[in-house]
């Protein structure tokens, strides 16, 4: 596997929820706290603005910058994983979230994480599938989420 290919992961999950509900879940701090390791997303969503996923004590676990914002379908951000001392010293990676409508009334959420440095890559390979499954279970309690590589 080449370095370029190995530094990218992509996942998708179909959620039996309206796209607007999925969008709210990934962009609202009250929702992210429920499925994203108790972190609350903070940003003003303007391109170039800082974005962070903060722990309950206010310390950022992940921080970056908004690169693209096209509500309610897609946002792209840089990301540095600050909760891990080794990953915190690595370069930023690029993370995109995309919500696509699915019939009847559901949504497809695609997460693509690129340009990932080595320590961060080991974290996200384990982390993203669980976070996406937790999002699904948060929106649809009792459901059986299926996270697929995209």
Image: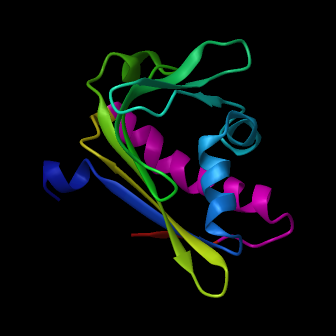
Q: Nearer the viewer, residue 67 or 59?
A: 67
Q: Is residue 27 rendered to the left or right of residue 11?
A: right
- Magenta stretch contains residue 141: yes
Figure check: 28 above or below 145: above
The spot of residue 2 in percent (x, y) is: 13, 55
Q: Residue at x 70, y 62 (%)?
A: 136
Q: Is residue 4 rendered to the left or right of residue 111?
A: left
Specify the principal SS of the magenta part.
helix
The spot of residue 28 in percent (x, y) is: 66, 39
Q: Is residue 121 rendered to the left or right of residue 17?
A: left
Q: Residue at x 39, y 26 (%)?
A: 64
Q: Residue at x 72, y 32 (%)?
A: 38
Question: In the rendered image, which quarter is residue 105 located in?
Answer: bottom right
The colour scheme of the drawn protein is: rainbow
**Residue closest to the far bottom:** 104
Q: Looking at the rendering, in which quadrant would you find the N terminus?
A: bottom left
Question: In the rendered image, which quarter is residue 101 located in?
Answer: bottom right
The spot of residue 89 in percent (x, y) is: 33, 16
Figure check: 76 above or below 49: below
Q: Looking at the rendering, in which quadrant would you find the C terminus?
A: bottom left
Question: In the rendered image, which quarter is residue 144 located in?
Answer: bottom right
- Magenta stretch contains residue 73: no
Part of the protein shown in magenta: 119-145
The spot of residue 22 in percent (x, y) is: 64, 59
Is there any visible trace of residue 113 in the rendered image?
yes
């Amino acid at each position: 596997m080449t370095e370029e290919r190995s530094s990218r992961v992509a996942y998708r999950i179909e959620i039996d929820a309206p796209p607007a509900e999925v969008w709210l879940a990934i962009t609202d701090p009250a929702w992210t706290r429920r499925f994203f390791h108790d972190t609350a997303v903070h940003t003003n969503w303007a391109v170039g603005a800082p974005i962070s996923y903060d722990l309950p004590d206010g310390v950022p676990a992940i921080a970056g910058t908004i690169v693209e914002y096209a509500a309610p379908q897609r946002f792209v951000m840089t990301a540095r994983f600050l909760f891990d001392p080794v990953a915190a010293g690595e370069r930023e990676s690029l993370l995109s979230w995309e919500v696509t409508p699915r019939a009847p009334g559901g949504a497809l959420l695609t997460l693509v994480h690129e340009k990932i440095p080595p320590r961060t890559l080991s974290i996200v390979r384990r982390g993203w599938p669980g976070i996406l499954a937790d999002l699904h279970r948060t929106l649809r309690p009792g459901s059986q989420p299926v996270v697929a590589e995209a």
